[in-house]
Image (spheres, rainbow, N blue to C red):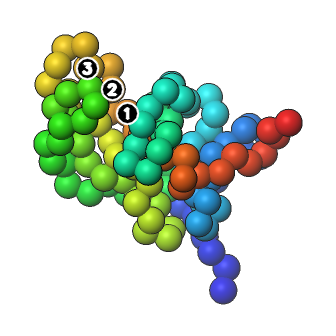
Amino acid sequence: MVKRFQAYLPNCHRTYSCIHCRAHLANHDELISKSFQGSQGRAYLFNSVVNVGCGPAEERVLLTGLHAVADIYCECCKTTLGWKYEHAFESSQKYKEGKYIIELAHMIKENGWN
């Protein structure tokens, strides 16, 4: 049986993929910051992602304050990857709204990393 992903990112770009099923998740050009912390260690903040589903939003107190976030998961293998910032309650955190956190424990670098 062949696994079909919803979206493929171009092979000429450096990409991040799901470590569990290798579905493409994000292009390196969409990376905003490597300075985030997830529940399982370091995490990256991305502007946009592919092959990712989103659960319901809920309010959580994170390291930087109260946020409304929704867990995100790989559409192909259903592994929880991180979360999406739906709303930031503090003005200094508004830049995160609509952005995605993916934990390093769930992704791998592919295509052109030397």
Q: Secondary structure at mark 3?
A: helix
- Where the N terminus falls, by quadrant? bottom right
**Residue that mark 3 sits on:** 94
Q: Residue at x 18, y 37 (%)?
A: 61
Q: Nearer the viewer, residue 26 or 58?
A: 58
In the image, residue 78 above or below residue 68: below
Q: Type of residue at label 3?
A: Lys
Mark 2 lies on residue: 96
* For residue 8, side relative to residue 105 (left or right): right
Q: Amino acid at mark 1?
A: Lys
| Coordinates of residue 46 in the picture (x, y in percent) | 48, 34
Which secondary structure lies at badge 2?
A: helix
Q: Are marks 2 and 1 in contact (CB under 8 Å)?
A: yes
Residue 91: horizontal and vertical position, in percent?
19, 14
Say few, some or many: other residues with alpha carbon within 10 Å of mark 3 (under 14 / 14 to 19 / 20 or more). Answer: some
Rendered residue at 85%/36% (across/down): 114
Q: Residue 79, how many percent across, how many down?
A: 44, 65
User: Can residue 24 be seen in this snapshot?
Assistant: no
Left or right, 93 with reference to 39: left
Separation of marks 3 and 1 at Cα, in angstroms: 10 Å
Where does label 1 land, which residue? Answer: 99
Q: Earlier in the sequence, mark 3 or mark 1?
A: 3
Q: Residues within 10 Å of mark 1 (few under 14, many from 20)?
A: some
